[in-house]
Image (cartoon, rainbow, N blue to C red):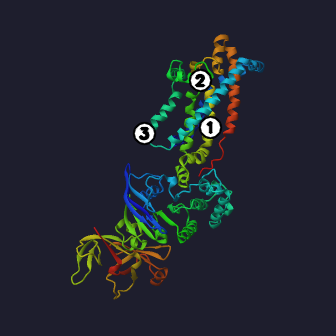
Amino acid sequence: MLEIDRISKHFKGFDLGPVSLSIREGDHFVLLGPSGSGKSLLLELIAGFQEADSGSLKFRGKDLQFSPAHKRPFGFVFQKPALFPHLSIYDNIAYPLRLKGLPKREHKAIVNGLTEWMHLSHLTHEFPARLSGGEAQRVSLARALAMKPAILLLDEPLSGLDVQLKDELRKYLHGLTKQGMTLIHVTHDFEEAVRFADQAAVIQDGKIIQKGLPAELYNHPANTFVANLCGHKNYFKVKLSPIPDSDLFAGNAGEVIFRLYAPADASKGVVIIDEQQIILHREPQISSAQNCLKGSITGIVPLQRGVQVELQVGVPLFCHITNHSLSLLQLRVGEQIMASFKASAISFLEQ
Amino acid sequence: MMKFTQLKFSRPKYLQLAITLAGGLFLLFIAAPLARLMLSTSADRLFATANDPEVSSSIGLSLGMAAIATLVTSLFAVPFAWLMARKEGRWKHFISGLIDLPMMIPHSAAGIALLGIVNRESLVGKAASAVGIDFIDRPAGIALAMAFVSVPYLYNAAYHAFASIPKRLELAAANLGAKPATVFYSISLPLAGRGILNGLVMMFARGMSEFGAVIMVAYNPFTTPVLIFDRFNAFGLRDAQAVSALFILISLVVFIVLRILSKPEEDVRN
């Protein structure tokens, strides 16, 4: 268990923390936040590259707060590969082994094992300048693994890579999680979090604002910032009023009124409507959907899976539907369409 | 409109001409005195000068002391440059300015300043005497004066070489288990090697040519720059010219050899 307790660090113009987190061993923990949120800084504090002003950092019950970077059992993979340009790939990977004073025979066995697993065997005699971005990042990962870290710290290792290389490196990270390696993975990309995380935390302006499973973050974002980070686009400020003879509330967003669940004493807040749960149809339908809005299509944008249909229903509303539905309904920009969704498809965040 | 187009096209021509002319004059300013000096001395005379024991021993002394000054000072200046390149703070500018100072002030003044510290009556002078080192009119004093005025060249080159190494490489090494000293010699020093070597060459070249500071601390034994001054005073321009030409020739050879050794290779840093 890695326990971070009220750790904080002050910079001119930026304050990190106090941050408290518990990370279980064997977990793939994703720290999610936009650039400048302090997520990389937190990772550097864990690695010992930065010294915290206050708080404590314990690993397996041992206080590491004052232990220097070279004594901490954490591997670090930087956003940009940090390979030593004057050493061959072999010597880069063997660098931590040499520091440990292992005999050369063992170096070879470990380096060969890692390079084979990561398909780097043909590159061991090359120098870093000759490698592509994806290869360099794989070598960085192999080198970090060579030191047999207790936890692997990943600082957006995929962000500089194109889609195909990302997939390739993801496979290795996934493999590591399966082998029981603890990973702390910093990213601004929610999809990465969904793909990987056993646990996730969102950091904003140096503070952790929500922790939980990625699905929890997506379904119940703590605020509009988390909602936005999770890829939600349908969030609106509303004033609430109870609907007589029902347990629902009417949320007035100006041009539109939504029907939703909310805490009994709530009066205003933000509603987030899950794009996936909006159903589009041409004719009025009798259904269990509490919300049915009519509007015109203002845009149709292909997604990695399916399409995003943008409607103007008084407010702009984004709906995700399948390609099949798109051709079945024969939707065109400018046409009128109806959008239905249940009261439970709306998350309410009180303000 | 017409005027504008004419102006647009004719201006660069004048500009180019003016720059070429200015550049030519600039090169002439550098090359002419040196060329005149070299041409004023015949090969025979150069050869005879080289065989003059006083001249050859002065050349040996200049090169030898400059080499010692460079190597000994580098043991202190290079690690310090690394430390400075990795620290932040306003005081850094102050320290950089301080280190540049010997380079900026008149070298005779630098020599006088040094003399104030190492003269036979001073604390340092007495302490050094006690362990058998004398600075005044001794080779040790020559090396000291050379080091004092030429070390900024080495320090600055080393500083910039270290500062240009991406910090994450050193952090990565520390993360992989390297102690700070190990990070220094296994990562920083090899990566800054070319820059440091350039600094050593600059310092050596500057040191062996030093006159002002050296003459204040040690008029004797003669280094070549002091000998040139002495010959000029005693025998006039022609004698001084011969020694000067010989020393310039030797400086040139030394400089070219060292430059080849420290020739920058393809930059392999990522």
Please state which amino acid type lies under the numbered disc 1.
Asn
Find disc 3 in the rendering and name its residue.
B90
Q: Secondary structure at mark 2?
A: loop
Query: Share a chain, discs 2 and 3?
Result: yes
As displayed, is residue A236 above or below residue A159? below
Left or right: residue A227 compared with residue B238: left
Q: Residue A193 location, x and y as percent?
A: 46, 68
Q: Quadrant of the C terminus of chain A?
A: bottom left
The image quarter in which residue B134 lies: top right
As displayed, is residue A101 above or below residue A117? above
Please state which amino acid type lies under the numbered disc 2.
Ile
Query: Share a chain, discs 2 and 1?
Result: yes
Tell me the number on the disc at residue B133.
2
Crowd tier of the residue under label 3, counting other residues whose Cα lies within 10 Å: few below 14, some 14–19, many 20 or above: few
Distance, label 3 to label 1, CA atoms, is: 27 Å
Observer-side mark, 2 or 3, equals 2
As displayed, is residue B235 above or below residue A68? above
Distance, label 2 to label 1, CA atoms, is: 30 Å
Q: Residue furthest left?
A: A244
In contact (CB < 8 Å): disc 2 and disc 1: no
Of label 2 and label 3, which has the lower sequence position?
3
Left or right: residue A107 compared with residue B213: right
Left or right: residue A276 compared with residue B261: left
Observer-side mark, 2 or 1, equals 2
Q: Residue B239 location, x and y as percent?
A: 70, 15
Query: Share a chain, discs 3 and 1?
Result: yes
Of label 3 and label 1, which has the lower sequence position?
3
Q: Secondary structure at mark 1?
A: helix
Tell me the number on the disc at residue B198.
1
Crowd tier of the residue under label 1, counting other residues whose Cα lies within 10 Å: few below 14, some 14–19, many 20 or above: many
Chain bearing mark 2: B
